[in-house]
Amino acid sequence: MNVTAVLRSEWAKVHTVRATLAALACVPLATAGFTALACATHEPGAGAADFDPVHSSYFGLGFGQLAALCFGVLVVTGEYRGGALRMSLAAVPRRGLFYGCKLAVVGGLGLAVGTVTGLVSFLVGQALLGEDGVGLGAPGALRAVLGCGLYLGLIAVLAAGVATVLRGPVAALGLLVPLLTFVQPVLGTGSPAFRVTRFLPDAAGQSVLHTTPWAGLGPWSGLAVLAAWTLLLAAAGWRALERRDA
Amino acid sequence: MTSIDVRDLRKDYGPIRAVDDVTFTVRPGRVTGFLGPNGAGKSTTLRVALGLDRPTTGRVTIGGRPYRSAPQPLRLAGALLDAGAALGARTARDHLRCLAYSNDIPHRRIAEVLAETGLEAVARRRVGTFSLGMRQRLGIAAALLGDPPVLMLDEPTNGLDPEGIVWIRELLRRLAADGRTVLVSSHLMGETARTADHLVVLGRGRLLADTPMADFIAAHSSPRAYLRTTEPERLRDLLAAVGLAGAPDGDGRWCLPDITAARVGELAAAGGVPLLELTDAQVSLEEAYLRLTADATQYAATRNPATGG
C-alpha cells in the first residue's frame, strides 16, 4: 500500500468532520484571544525587572492547548465510534501504516496550525503591550513562534496516542486535561514541587516560550522532554492498536 | 481463482473458544450461505478473514494470500460488517471518499456504488441521520467500492425493507454470476434458500456442514409424501403391513412421514389402490437447518456440559 494514498485518506477523515475542524480552528482563536485579553490590561513601563514580553504573548496558550488536545483525541476516537475502525482497518490492514499516517496528519496539522497560532498570538500580544512590545527580531522571539508550533504539534500527537490507548474521548480528555493544564500551573513555579513538575509535558514544552531566565528547563531541552513524552505515549498507542483485536 | 480458504482456524477470546478448528473453502461463481446460531463463530471467522482479529491458530487466505498482505485490500475483498461501520458525523459520500483514497480507487466508483445501492439522493446527508436500512446500503456500497472479486457480507438483509431484501437477493445472484466469490451470513432461512447455492454451517464454533444447498436439505430432513386416494380403508391396511400409520386430514389429503412418493407409488400399485395425487413434500431449508443445529446443540451439551451456552 502506498503512504501518499493513506495520508490522503487520513487527511480526508479530518476535514470531512466538522468537530475536528472546529477544534483545530479554536487553537489560534483561543490562544490569541486570551492573550489579547491579558495584554490589553498590561500597563506599559510598570512591569517588574523580569518582565518577559515574548512570553506574555502566550498567556492564552493554555486555552489553545485544550483545543489541540481535543483535536488529537477526536481524530482517534472518531474511529472507535460506530465500529468505524473495522472499516478503516479493512481498507488499511497494515496497522503501522494506518497509525503512522494518522499521527503524521495530526502532527502535521498541529504543527502548521500551531505555527500560525504562534505568529498571530505573538503579533496580537506585542501590539497590545504598547511600548513594552518587541518585534520578531527580538532575542528568542522567532524561537518562541516556531516553538509554539512544535509544542502544539507534539501535544496533538501525544493526545492521539493517549486516545488510542483509552479509545473513548471522555477517558482521554479526563486524563489529559487535568494532567496537562492544571497540575503544573496550580502548583506554580515557586514551589519545591516545580523541580518535578517542570518535567511534565506542558511545563517542559512551554520552556521554549521563555526569553528571560526562569526556574524551568532550557528552551530546547524542554521541548526535547516534551518530544520524549510524545514518543512514549505514541508508542503506547501503537502497542495497544497492534495487539488488540479490532 | 479467488477463493476464501479457511484452514484449521481456531480463535479463543479468553476462556471462550469462538471458532474451533474450522476448515472450509468458499469458491467463486456461486453464493455461499454462511449459517449458524448466534455465537456460532460466523462473525469471528469474517473478522479473522479481514485481518481484524488475530487467529489463535490456523489461517484464512483470500486468493492464496492473507488479506493483510494485499497491496490494495478493498480491491481484493469487500466486506459488510455491523451496519456500515461509519462515523455518524461524516456524509455518506465523504465516508466512501475516505475509503477510496486509501486504496487508490478512482473517484467515479463512488458515484457508481452510490447509484448501485440507491443512495444517490442521500449521499450528502450525514450517516448519523440514516436509518438502519440506509446504513446497511452504505455498508454494501463500501464493500462494492473496490469492485472486488470477493465479497463477505454479514447479515446484509438486517434492517432492509421488503424491496431492499429483493434488491439484495438480485445483487447477490448477479455478483455470483459475474464469477465473484460471495459469502453471506444470514438468519433468514427463506432468503438464504432463495439466494445461496452452497452452505457452510457453523455451530458452537465447529463446522457442521459444507455442502450444496440441495444435499444439505436432503441430508437433514426426512422425506414426506402427500397423497389422495379414493380408497382410504385399503390404503391404511396396505401401510400397516409395512409398518406405517397414516390418516387423511379434513380435506382428504394424507401426509405420510418417513417415506418417499416413489415408495408410496410402488406400494399402492402393488396393492391396486388408486391414487388421485402423489407428491414429495418440499422440505424447507429452515426445517433442515433447525434439525441440524438442534442435534448439534444437544451433542455439544451432552459432550461438554462445563462450557455452557
Image (cartoon, coloured by chain):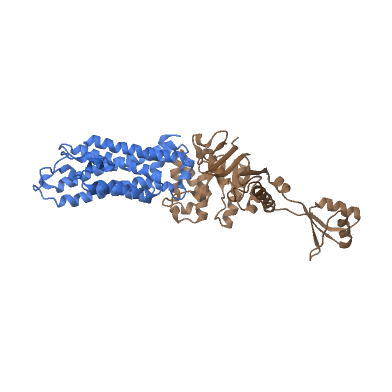
Chain colours: A blue, B brown
Q: Position of residue A181 (x, y in %)?
A: 27, 48
Q: Is residue B27 visible?
A: no
Position of A179 with respect to B264 (left or right) is left
- Observer-nearest of B142 and A94: A94
Query: Quadrant where the N terminus of chain B lies?
Result: top right
Residue depicted at x 29% and y 46%: A180
Residue B246 position, x and y percent, is 82, 59
Q: Position of residue B140 (x, y in %)?
A: 53, 48
What residue do we see at 18% from left, 51% from top? A38
Quadrant of residue B239 within the rendered picture: bottom right
Which residue of the protein is positioned furthest toward the left in this rendering? Answer: A45
Furthest toward the bottom, the residue is B250
- The picture quadrant where one finds residue A132 is top left
Q: Exactly how many numbered labels are in the figure?
A: 0
At 21% from the left edge and 43% from the top edge, which residue is drawn? A192
Answer whether residue B9 is visible to the viewer in this image. yes
**In the visual, does A181 lie left or right of B261?**
left
Q: Is residue B21 above or below residue A25?
A: above
Residue A219 x %, y %: 22, 36
